[in-house]
Image (tube, rainbow, N blue to C red):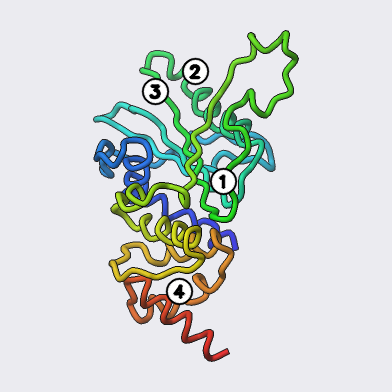
Amino acid sequence: MQEKDITRKKFERHNDVFADIVNVLLFGGKNIISEDLLCDVPTSNLLKIDEKFDYQDRVISKYWKNSQLNIALVGFENQTNPYKSMPLQVICYDCAEYSRQSVREYRHTKKYPVITLILHLGYNKRWKYPKSLRGVLNINKNLLPYVNDYTINVFEIAHLNRDIIDSFESDFWILADYLYQMRTDKTYVPDTGTIKHIEELLLLMSITTGDRRFEQVIDEVLEKKITNMREVLDIIEAEDMEK
């Protein structure tokens, strides 16, 4: 089970997918971050908060580098359902990296920002919870001027405009298109475009949608060297007919 959990995260860990998501959501589709400038965060840099809240386990992070210098650390958090305490969780993620930069060992290095993107991958519920630290705290009005705020970046993929959906160039477009169609049409008409990371995509779609059929057909998809969602759906429908 642990091996499958790791595999599910591999989809967004592919540099082409990671860069595509950042370029579309943060830079309007401009190719600001190229995949060859992304570097995985070393395990030694990850901070464990406690036994139930593991920075390494919960977030997908990469350094955006220029030569040997870090421009930023960018992390993703996938959410299939809105989460009220997300601002508290994100500030812990970001603080872990800022804390690492503050230690004596790095006192002479240039400091860089930490950016966390919340990818809301559900399509049935909007994100109606506060998107800032102040929004989730019960603050006495006399203390309000002294409480620093912290805003989170939430992207509701199923609710993006169609032109934004279609600006994705990696396999992430398949997932975004699926979520958009399910929200607007309540059904999915698959595309015939070639999928580069089909196993990882199907695993992520399985856990995101709760439809285990995406995961169950992976072996057959790989055996038959299927490369597009239309043929994947053909296999799923054929197996449903046999039941």
Pointer 3 residue: 112
Work out whether mark 4 precedes mark 1 in sequence or the reverse, and give the earlier one: 1
Q: Looking at the image, tell me whether mark 2 or mark 4 is earlier in sequence order.
A: 2
Disc 1, SS: helix
Disc 1 and disc 3: Cα gap in Å?
Answer: 23 Å
Amino acid type of the residue tagged 1 in the rendering: Asp
Q: How many marks?
A: 4
Amino acid beneath label 2? Ser
- Residue at the spot of label 4: 218
Front residue of 17/187: it is: 187
Q: Quadrant of the N terminus?
A: bottom right
Q: CA distance from mark 1 to mark 2?
A: 23 Å
Q: Look at the numbered discs 1 and 2 and tell me whether their residues touch, using CB distance below 8 Å.
A: no
Disc 1 crowd, CA 10 A, few/some/many (<14, 14-19, 20+): few
Which residue is at a point 28% across and 44% down the rendered structure image? 35
**Label 2 – label 4 distance at C-alpha:** 45 Å
> Which residue in the structure is indicated by mark 2?
102
| Residue pictured at 34% horizontal, 76% vertical | 226
Crowd tier of the residue under label 2, counting other residues whose Cα lies within 10 Å: few below 14, some 14–19, many 20 or above: few
159 to 61, vertically: above or below: below
Q: Is residue 24 left or right of residue 59?
A: left
